[in-house]
Structures are given as C-alpha cells and as structure tokens.
Amino acid sequence: MQQSQQREYPLALTIAGSDSGGGAGIQADLKTMQELGVFGTSALTAVTAQNSMGVHGVYPLSVETVAAQMDAVLSDMGADSVKTGMLFAPDIIRVVSAKLGQYGRIPVIVDPVMIAKGGAPLLQEEAVETMKVHLFPLSEVVTPNIPEACALLGLQEDDIRSEADMAEAGRALLRYGCGAVLIKGGHLPAGSAGGECVDVLVTGGAEPSMFRTPRLPTRHTHGTGCTLSSAIAAMRARGENLPDAVRAAKHFVTAAIAASVPTGQGIGSLWHAAHREVPAGR
Ligand SMILES: Nc1ncnc2c1ncn2[C@@H]1O[C@H](COP(=O)(O)OP(=O)(O)O)[C@@H](O)[C@H]1O
Ligand SMILES: Cc1ncc(COP(=O)(O)O)c(N)n1
C-alpha cells in the first residue's frame, strides 16, 4: 500500500549501509534527497566503520531488522521511489526483494554496490547472483559502475573501454529483467572520452542515451555513485521521467564533485550543498 496521496511532498526510501565517514551510503543518500526537496527515509542494511582512508569494519544487520524498518516506513508513509545501495548478503537481498514485491509498484533504483573505492568488499561474492535473480527484475533502473558491470557479466575489468562497450554491457544486463541500465563512466581511463565523464543509459527500445559532463580533476570522489543513484530516486519521486531524472542527477553529482572536500587524509567526499553555490564550511 502506498500512502503518497496523503502527502503534499515527495518521499523516497533508501535501503543501504551506513558510512560513518558521512560521504557515501545512507548519509550521502539522505543529504542528496534533502537537497533535492525530497523527504528521505531509510532502512539500514549494515553499519560500516569507514573514513577517507578506507573501510575498517562491516557489521551487517539481521534480516529481521531490515524487514522491520521497511515495514515501518512503507506501511505508514509509503514511498514515491526507492533506492537500494549496499545490501551485503544474499539473505538481505532476498528479504528486500520480497518486501519490495509486497508493497507494490514503487520505482526502484538499484545501485549494485560491490566494492568501496579503497577496494574493500561491500557485497559478498555469492550475493551477486542473488541480486541478479531477485532484485534486478524489480528495478526501474540498475546503475553499475564499470567494474560492477564487468563482475555482473563475468567480464575482465578492461573488457569495457569505450562508450560502445558500455552500451553493449548495458544491453546484456537488460536480459536479467532490469527496466533499464545506466552504466557509469567514472572508471573509464581519464583520456578515453575526450576529457568527459560519460554515463550511458540503455532502455528496452530506443538507442542508448549518453549523459556527458566534464571530467573533473579531483581524487575526492567518495560517494559519487551513492549520490547519483539517490538523486535519480529523488527526481523520480518528484515525478520526472527516467531520462530527465538521470540528466538532473548527473548535474547534481557533477556540482557536488566540483565542490568536494578533503575530509581526512585519503579520498575526500562530495559537498552535497554545492548546487546552492554555498562554499564548503562557510
Ligand atoms: N572525476 C569525475 N568528474 C566528473 N564526474 C565524475 C567523476 N568521477 C565520477 N563521475 C561521475 O560520478 C558518477 C558516479 O560514477 P562512478 O565513479 O563511475 O561510480 P561509482 O561511484 O559507483 O564508482 C557518474 O555520473 C560519473 O560520471
Ligand atoms: C556504506 C557504503 N555504501 C556505499 C559505498 C560506495 O561508495 P561510492 O558511492 O563511492 O561507490 C561505500 N563506500 N559505503
């Protein structure tokens, strides 16, 4: 049951892990939703002890805890869109999929989070198959980065090297029942797209759509994927169609990268208020 008709503002639910460092996961998702004028709710799947240097611990929550949070939010408040991020384990993916099925036709944005920027696994290896079988068929769009697309398709990391390769990978992933696939180009070699960062949206019918922005010369990109997928969820909650939501989300994440902050000694995080043109910390 969806309760959205009783609200006068859009509401989105993020189902994801907590990043104690504040740049990715639930923290990035809620900041993004708030900035885009959408009321954000959350169901936590795992707590990570994380900072700019990397992931120091992963503490998954029980299946019952995840299910109870989803029930609490969806039975009372409903949601105009859902975003999933770090899900970590097969049993968490199964319960999230079952609950999404139970609460009906909400647009679901699936960010198939697998590995943190520093290399730590955020998804168990055996959960990759569970995600493809149980969650992908419920998705409106799945948003892998290039290493995730390779892992999902059993390809080598350097098998996707161009926009054409990205489009082909997107088409191959559609076979798992995803509504659409957005392959993110942040991991393409820096010189390969004429200084641009290109994301490729593949849907069932039309030609792939390319979303291009300048590639920004910063290493402080912690949370880019989380921010992009939650911005898509926020724009869908506001009633935009998928391509317009992706376009707006890409602009939002680009502004947030341009204003990113060196939060610690390692990889810094995005500044989610950048679109308001408020300089960080001032
Ligand atoms: N250096 C950069 N400059 C501009 N946009 C970037 C940069 N790095 C990543 N992006 C954008 O951030 C979003 C997330 O992409 P990516 O980094 O590939 O995903 P992930 O965070 O999942 O690894 C995409 O829209 C991508 O184009
Ligand atoms: C809890 C959590 N979820 C997701 C990511 C991925 O971050 P990114 O958006 O940089 O790929 C992360 N590092 N931590």
Image (cartoon, helix red, strand yellow):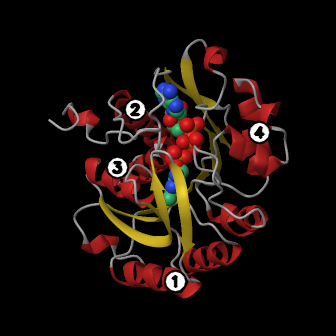
Amino acid type of the residue tagged 4 in the rendering: Ala
CA distance for labels 4 and 1 = 32 Å
Say whether marks 1 and 2 touch (CB < 8 Å). no
Residue 196 versus residue 271 in the image, above or below: above
What residue appears at the point 27 percent right and 54 percent down from the top-left corner?
Answer: 34
Distance (Cα) linking label 4 and label 3: 28 Å
Q: Residue at x 31, y 52 (%)?
A: 31
Q: Residue 150 in the image: x percent, y percent?
A: 77, 43
Depth check: 39 or 253 in front? 253
Question: What crowding class fits label 2: few (fewer than 14 Cα within 10 Å), some (14-19), or many (20 or more)?
Answer: many
Q: Which mark is residue 5?
A: none
Reading the chain from its start, which is encountered first: label 3 or label 1?
3
Q: Residue at x 37, y 53 (%)?
A: 22
Residue at numbered disc 1:
67
* Residue denoted by label 2: 257
* Position above or below: 248 against 196: below
Closer-to-camera residue (230/203):
230
Does mark 2's beta carbon lie closer than 8 Å to ligand 1? yes
| Left or right of 7, for residue 171 | right
Identity, as a three-letter code, of the amino acid under mark 3: Thr
Which amino acid lies under the numbered mark 1 shown in the image of this protein?
Ala
Residue holding disc 4: 169
Q: SS at mark 1?
A: helix
